[in-house]
């Protein structure tokens, strides 16, 4: 379980309040979407929950461990053992092939059996290709494969379809949801697209650094059922 | 994994500096070791010259080896910093994935490859030049046999490479100490609000850009100053050396060549980094309609006073260094003439300096002009 209690974060010596006293609970295996406009604090909240950034105050526990108390080395180990990331900008290593990029995730988790993940994401015929030779959708699938190759307990996704067109975006989202169902990890996705919220179990809506609404979705839709 | 051997080979500047250091150390150290047992064979009258040559070999080995090692270490640290800044998102991604700082830092050991190549070439060429140098430094017509010492390989190739690998590891452990998210954003941990700059209000725009370019590139400013320092000090020292020691022409040329190589290496390294760091500013100025001369001035002009400062300090340094050498090392050698400041050498060096650095700026101006706005703006 991920539990954030009264978390606040400011930037520029307190001039910008990114998060104001935010509390949130996410159950194991849950798919939660953090929804909000640009500057609402959704990415900051995700960065806090994943141990990428530290809050100014408040407490974040993951499976009972207070990650705000961990030092940098312990946080790195926490991310290594628990967390997978999918970024909007992919952040693939440009000089490495698709296989090596995925291996980068597998390697750190000592997972030698990463080929089925590449296969599941339909990248088998692109193993030797460099990121620059791939389309946006393919690059995002490599990013997902890299994250899944770590066998994460929690998968964090920051606007994974934000840079993709509708068709590719739906395909990538479908791909993510299939893997989520198959592997059962906890998934937290940040998005500004309200429709994507309909694919989640829980929607956390944010505005100006505050949670303005949290609700459970009555019927989860597939990536092809939602509007775009 | 993160850094390929190809990246390690890009450190030509470090290879050149290491080459120079090991090249000089190889034959002076070998010469010293070969000549040392010959004291009894040297006649009474030549004892002073013999001792002076031993002292020269010791000094050249120590000073050149020491100074160049420090320079190479600075260059390595400088390059690692540039590499980390240029690959911040890659490092941030790896840190986010859970790669520890230690594991990332190990990759930087590959940069010692440049040191290994430079040292090996220096050692090889040092041995190749040895017969010529021995001939130049012959005392009393005594034949000095060249002895090949395998342990010098350990001292001049293996040890520096290992030391620089350790240095790269240490620098890389400290330099990217930013959180994964800060690296992913490609910036600092949390940007401190900058102090209001009252003076900038009164400066013309182009002067302001030139001023900010220097203040934003302090490390480059150091290397520009250092490059000019090297040029002034070693070219004048090379010329001055000719008058100081018998058969000083070879030594003079050696110092002069090393000086020019060092100065140009650091000049090219700093200019390349400068142009790369300021690509977007230049592209924007081009888009807005600033002519080439003004764009160039915005990048390079701010460094002109530093170049002049480097030249002045280099001139003073070589004068003080040679004066000390005459008074301390060659104090017992009667034939050494009195050393005085060489105004002629100063003017020759100044003219060569102005010509060389103008040519370098012209070369980079040409390069800047050929780069398209799109290629700069779309690069990640």
Image: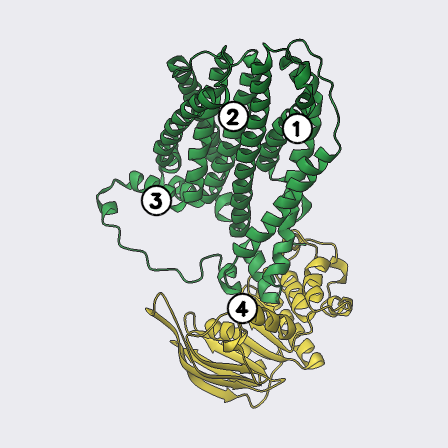
Chain colours: A yellow, B green
Label 3 resides on the chain identified as B
**Can residue A192 be spotted in the picture?**
no
Observer-side mark, 1 or 3, equals 1
* Pointers 1 and 4 in contact (C-beta within 8 Å): no
Residues indicated by labels 1 and 4 sit on the same polypeptide chain: no
| Residue at x 61%, y 40% (from the top left corner) | B10
Q: Is residue A153 found left or right of B272 in the rendered image?
A: right
Closer to us: B273 or B160: B160
Label 2 resides on the chain identified as B
Around disc 1, counting alpha carbons within 10 Å, would you say few (fewer than 14), some (14 to 19), or many (20 or more)? many
Q: Is residue B81 found left or right of B8 in the rendered image?
A: left
Residue B26 badge? 1
Closer to us: B297 or A69: A69
Q: Which residue is mark 3?
A: B212
Q: CA distance from mark 1 to mark 4?
A: 45 Å
Q: Is residue B306 found left or right of B120 in the rendered image?
A: left
Q: Which residue is mark 2?
A: B259
Residue A17, percent from left and from top: 36, 73
């Amino acid at each position: 379980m991920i539990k954030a209690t009264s978390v606040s974060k400011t930037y520029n010596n307190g001039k910008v309040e990114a998060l104001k006293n935010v509390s949130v609970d996410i159950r194991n295996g849950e798919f939660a979407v953090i929804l909000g406009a640009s500057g609402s604090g959704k990415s900051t909240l995700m960065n806090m929950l994943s141990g990428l950034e530290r809050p100014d105050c408040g407490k974040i526990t993951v499976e009972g461990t207070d990650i705000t108390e961990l030092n940098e080395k312990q946080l790195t180990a926490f991310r290594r053992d628990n967390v997978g990331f999918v970024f909007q900008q992919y952040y693939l290593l440009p000089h490495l092939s698709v296989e090596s990029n995925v291996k980068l995730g597998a390697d750190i988790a000592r997972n030698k059996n990463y080929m089925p993940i590449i296969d599941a994401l339909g990248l088998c015929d692109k193993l030797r290709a460099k990121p620059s030779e791939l389309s946006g959708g393919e690059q995002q699938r490599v990013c997902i494969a890299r994250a899944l190759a770590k066998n994460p307990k929690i998968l964090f996704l920051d606007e994974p379809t934000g840079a993709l067109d509708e068709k590719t975006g739906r395909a990538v989202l479908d791909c993510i949801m299939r893997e989520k169902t198959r592997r059962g990890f906890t998934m937290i996705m940040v998005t500004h697209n309200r429709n994507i919220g309909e694919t989640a179990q829980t929607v956390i809506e944010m505005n100006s650094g505050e949670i303005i609404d949290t609700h459970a979705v009555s019927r989860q839709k597939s990536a092809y059922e939602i509007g775009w | 994994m993160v850094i390929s051997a190809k990246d390690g080979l890009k450190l030509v500047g470090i290879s050149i500096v290491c080459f120079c250091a090991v090249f000089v150390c190889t034959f002076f150290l070998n010469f010293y070791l070969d000549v040392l047992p010959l004291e009894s064979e040297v006649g009474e009258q030549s004892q002073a010259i013999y001792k002076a040559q031993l002292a020269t070999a010791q000094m050249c080995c120590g000073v050149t080896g020491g100074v160049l090692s420090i320079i190479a270490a600075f260059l390595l640290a400088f390059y690692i910093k540039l590499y980390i800044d240029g690959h911040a998102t890659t490092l941030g991604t790896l840190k986010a994935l859970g790669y520890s700082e230690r594991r990332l830092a190990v990759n930087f050991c590959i940069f010692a490859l440049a040191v290994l190549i430079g040292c090996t070439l220096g050692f090889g060429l040092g041995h190749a030049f040895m017969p010529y140098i021995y001939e130049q430094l012959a005392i009393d017509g005594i034949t000095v046999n060249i002895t090949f010492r395998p342990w010098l390989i350990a001292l001049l190739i293996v040890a520096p490479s290992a030391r620089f690998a350790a240095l790269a590891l240490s620098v890389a452990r400290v330099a990217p100490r930013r959180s994964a998210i800060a690296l992913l954003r490609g910036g600092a941990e949390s940007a401190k609000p900058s102090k209001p700059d009252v003076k900038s209000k009164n400066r013309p725009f182009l002067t302001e850009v030139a001023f900010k370019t220097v203040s934003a590139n302090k490390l480059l400013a150091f290397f520009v100053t250092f490059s000019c320092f090297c040029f002034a000090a070693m070219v004048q020292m090379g010329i001055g050396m000719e008058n100081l020691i018998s058969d000083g022409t070879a030594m003079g040329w050696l110092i002069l060549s090393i000086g020019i190589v060092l100065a140009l290496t650091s000049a090219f390294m700093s200019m390349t980094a400068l142009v790369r760091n300021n690509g977007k500013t230049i592209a924007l100025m081009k888009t807005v309609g600033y002519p080439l001369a003004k764009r160039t001035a915005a990048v390079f002009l701010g460094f002109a006073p530093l170049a002049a400062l480097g030249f002045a300090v280099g001139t003073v340094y070589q004068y003080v260094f040679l004066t000390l050498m005459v008074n301390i090392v060659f104090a017992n050698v009667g034939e050494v003439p009195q050393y005085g400041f060489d105004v002629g050498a100063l003017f020759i060096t100044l003219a060569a300096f102005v010509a060389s650095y103008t040519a370098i700026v012209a070369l980079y101006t040409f390069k800047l002009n050929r780069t398209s706005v799109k290629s700069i703006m779309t690069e990640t």
